Image (tube, rainbow, N blue to C red):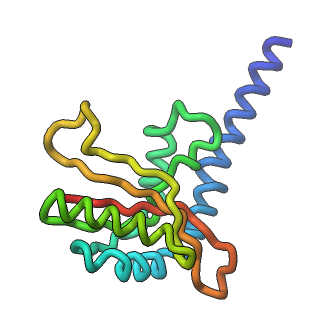
Amino acid sequence: QMLERKEDDEQTEDVRAFVDSNLALNNLTSTATKINDEFQHYMRIVMSAHGEFKEAQMKKVERSQSKIENDYNSERFPRSAKLLDVVRCAVTFNTVDQLLNGYQALIQHMQHNQSAVELARVKNGFLDAQADHGYRDIKVNVIYTSQNPEYTNVRMICEVQLLL
């Protein structure tokens, strides 16, 4: 009976791995493909007055699979839910004051009733004591709701990187 239970656990883990690396990732990629262009356009309008906006390519399926299998290997199922940057953009600032002003502008925009984005998470890399003094940023994860009438109720967590 212990052998059966171990086999059941292995089969369950195989199914979970399949769901994470195939079904869920396929769904994420499909959603990302639908909203990427309009997200980039929307965020360019919101953030261009505050810093240099840079459109980023969608994260490739191979890189997403690698993150699921390696970076999120010890996370609970569904590990694919940890992928919050399949759709992303960056805004570069010249000074800390400009970065803070850009961050505040984004937060204020999200508090507006007609905003297509709402706050999901903020990850402040400047507070990371383990990071060296090299690359640091503020990652703002937003829930973007498609404004395209063809995609009613299509929403996805996307990432806005605020860089110096």
**Is residue 33 visible in this depiction of the protein?**
no
Residue under the point 43% across and 72% down: 109
Q: Residue furthest bottom?
A: 149
Tell me where residue 1 appears, x and y as whole percent: 86, 12
Residue in front for this viewpoint, 36 or 41? 41
Up the image or down, 12 lies above or below 164; here it is: above
Q: Is residue 129 left or right of residue 28?
A: left
**Is residue 39 visible in this depiction of the protein?**
yes
Tell me where residue 85 appears, x and y as whole percent: 44, 58
Up the image or down, 145 lies above or below 132; here it is: below
Residue under the point 58% across and 49% down: 81
Up the image or down, 71 lies above or below 110; here it is: above
Residue in front for this viewpoint, 56 or 21? 56
Tell me where residue 117 appears, x and y as whole percent: 51, 69
Residue in front for this viewpoint, 157 or 95? 95
Residue under the point 36% across and 54% down: 139
Q: Is residue 101 left or right of residue 121?
A: left
Residue 154: quadrant of the picture: bottom right
